[in-house]
Image: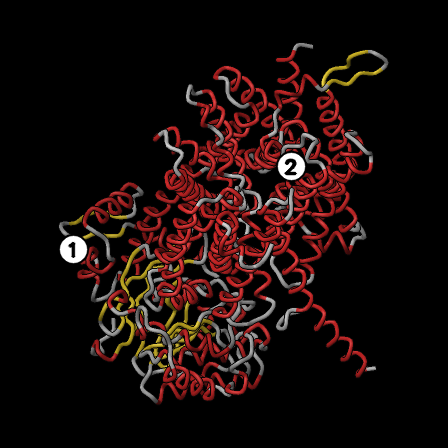
Amino acid sequence: MSGALAIALVAIVAGASCGLAGVFLVLRRLAMMSDAISHAILPGLVAGYFFARGPNLIAAFLGATAAGVLTVFLVETIVRMRRLKEDAAIGLVFPALFAIGVLLVSRYFANVHLDTDAVLYGEIALAPFDTWNVAGRNLGPQSLWVLAGLGLLNAGFLYLFFKELKLSTFDPGLAEILGFRPGLLHYSFMTIIAMTTVGAFSAVGAILAVALIVIPAVTASFWTTRLPVVIVLSIGIGAFAGLLGYGAATAIDVSISGAIATTLGLLVGGSALFAPRTGFVAQALLRRRQRWAFAATALVIHLAHHRGTDAEVEESRLDHLQAELGWSSDEVNRIVRESEEAGWTIREGDRLVLTETGARAAAGRLVADRA
Amino acid sequence: MTWTEVFTDYTLRNVALGSAILGVVSGVLGTFAVLRRQGLAGDALAHAALPGICLAYLATGSKAAPVLMLGAALAGWVGMVILIGFLRRTRVDPGSALAIVLTTFFGFGVVLLTVVQKRPDAGQAGLDKFLFGQAAALVQDQVVLMAGLSVVVLVLIAALFKEFKVFVFDVDYARTLGLPTGRLGALLTALLVIAIVIGLNTVGVVLMSAMLVAPAAAARQWTESLGRMILLAAGFGATAGIFGALWSVSQDHTPTGPAIVLILSLLVVVSLLFGSSRGWVWERVRRHRQSGVGA
Amino acid sequence: MSVRPALAHAIEVRDLTVAYEEKPVLWDLDVDVRSGALTAIIGPNGAGKSTLLKAILGLVPRVAGSVSIFGKPLSEDRGKVGYVPQRSSVDWDFPADALDVVLMGMYGRLGWLRRPGRTEREKALECLEEVGMRELAQRQIGRLSGGQQQRVFLARALAQDARLYMMDEPFAGVDAVTEQAVVETLRKLRDRGKTVVVVHHDLGSAPEYFDEAILLNVRLVASGPIDEVFTPENLHKTYGAGARFLVAP
């Protein structure tokens, strides 16, 4: 397998596997837990190195996963003591574990090359050099197999426990009552998240691991509210970002991990701005439209309110509307146009007169909104 | 090593002073951040500083601390604006929004780092060191700069203490009192960014969140008054800063940042268990006695 | 439209429309609040009671209409209105004791840079005394009962010494002692010539506690002296067919 192909494949598979893992993590509002785990696994790696008396993939993996689960446990214990809020608990636990890791590395492994800065950046470009050889056959990059395995693990877990996860995410109380043991499910899920983070971390670095887990799921949720579609989209977005980021990075010769994270950021930023309905632009337009529509409705309700009273003539004069309703003359023009287009009012000299349609619209709106 | 060396040894003095200053500033601003539930915003903004540092270098060609700090602060500010945009204008939850800002900015920063390294004058790269803390390499000019910034921060907090207090406690009420709540919030965030920039240089990006959260979290367990909480947090921060610096200078292979953070973590554990106001142990004892009486 | 002289009105709301992206909303509300009276804002859940309060205080944007307080727009002198928010609106875990919270009532008057001193502390303690909370002045606010927390808010309002008070559900979920303390405080404020507007949800107690009422359901149903406003017809209009179950015989 060529180096370039190997890197591209690792990027795509990492994106797909993490994208899948992140869906329920984001739905459970635990995105920052993956950030905490990605930093806290450092002492776990050291512990693995220590117990195996040297670099050993399995020991490192087990140690790091255990540290990840420990992070979750410590954060939840502190929150359960009800002394600190969750954000503070996370902000305490992972730096403490990371500090222990850095200290251990610099004390006992000063001669071993375990650069703590590189832990954050990650260097996916090294992927092809770390191949898996069985019985003399080169089976390709190790991280590719690890990530693919983690993807399958996530898929299997979701397949088996989809309805339990869904229920315990949206209604933990009900899940408890129905006997689904949300606590056990939660820790199983977080263990898989920790494993995924560790796997992605060793291939692409801590920060990109977090980006790959969180951002595809968030991006997907801008485009659909149907959970199965979110899952499929999230996998696709992760893989696509991996490929695109890799392509961009090689084209302009910059860090691949950095380029993939940047691509993910652009994807979620673009979705947040431009997604139909939920995007910023769509929302802003909707709000503006609603504002004018509300204002026009307020106008006809105001006219209906005074219809048939002594004050009717006074209350329906255009200049009076401007003063009383607190609108500028431009706003009054716009709002009056809005209501004339709807057929709610007609102009008679300097007065506005309510049509029958307008009167019905006003009455209907008031009935509809009643509590 | 003796105590007097803190005042005579040039390196030790700079490291200890720099760490103490950081401890005070981050203790004070961390108190507000924790009360506003922005404990993790510090983490996101610290990571968000990287592209700012790179762009500042690319724009000026200078690696002077004030230039890089300004770049870091501007990037942190932009990160905060985007974060707030996500929270106000979309349905993305706060944790996801933080993760998005953190990873995207940092990833873009890593891209820029590789751009910097490719420049012909790359001999002077190593910008990333700015981000991973180099307390042991603090020089006097940097400490003076840190001191100057922290004086500005502390004077503003002292002058606007009661306004910040009511703003953090109840924004709507503060507005009805006629306070400019939008500007107060922006100012508090700007001060937080300054604290983070000071910290990047000293303890580094990953440990910064502990510098903000830990002193405040420990202090909260000992008092029910905001004023005392701030003073205690500053005290805890300074103590951890000085002792962390001493520890790291007196022993080989002990980086300053992790040393400070471990001392702070220890302070938090002790405070959570034995804090005079909210200590967990006292509550257990009380409950035990109560159930004993009941039985 | 009202024919009473403008000065008799603490609040004049004209053609007020408030619309969120969703409910609750208020449509074209004209209402006056008489100066020196206890006024209840009454209506079913979702009728826009709290929204009206917040719109008067300028805390939510208006689509149309105007609000004047003692003849001037609110922005001209904000400190003259004392706001008592819903208890659920703040973090009771905050590091502050009852006295700290009451002192906040005087922050507006103190102005920038000045700190509350001995005079302010004494005044705050007096206000706590008035609501029967003096001995709990040093207690952390999270360790107070719901009713005690409500009374701390009342004491803060007293300390603010405003002309007009706006209270959001001060009777919600409180014990009998607090309910009595709230009522007494309201009357004391009225006797000192203050105007008080209260969001209230208990129809049964309203006629006993209040002078005037504003019946609300998205639009104004009726407003004025409570005896005149509380007719079966008005209540039916406000609450729909359920009204007869809500008023105790």
Question: Around disc 1, counting alpha carbons within 10 Å, would you say few (fewer than 14), some (14 to 19), or many (20 or more)?
Answer: some
Q: Is residue B27 above or below residue B63?
A: below
Which dot marks residue A319?
A: 1
Q: What residue occupies the far left of the structure in this picture? A: A349
Of residues A184 and C114, the one drawn nearer to the viewer in this rendering:
C114
Image side of residue A256 versus residue A275, left or right: right
> SS for tag 2?
helix
| Type of the residue with mark 2 | Gly
Q: Which mark is residue C126?
A: none
* In the image, farthest residue toward the right: A135
- Residue C18 versus residue C120 in the image, above or below: above
Q: Residue at x 33, y 78 (%)?
A: C162
Up the image or down, B154 lies above or below C194; here it is above
> Is residue C217 something one can see in this rendering?
no
Counting from the top left corner in percent of width and height, residue C223 is at 35, 74
* The quarter of the displayed image where residue C248 is located: bottom right
Is residue A86 toward the left or the right of residue C167 in the image? right
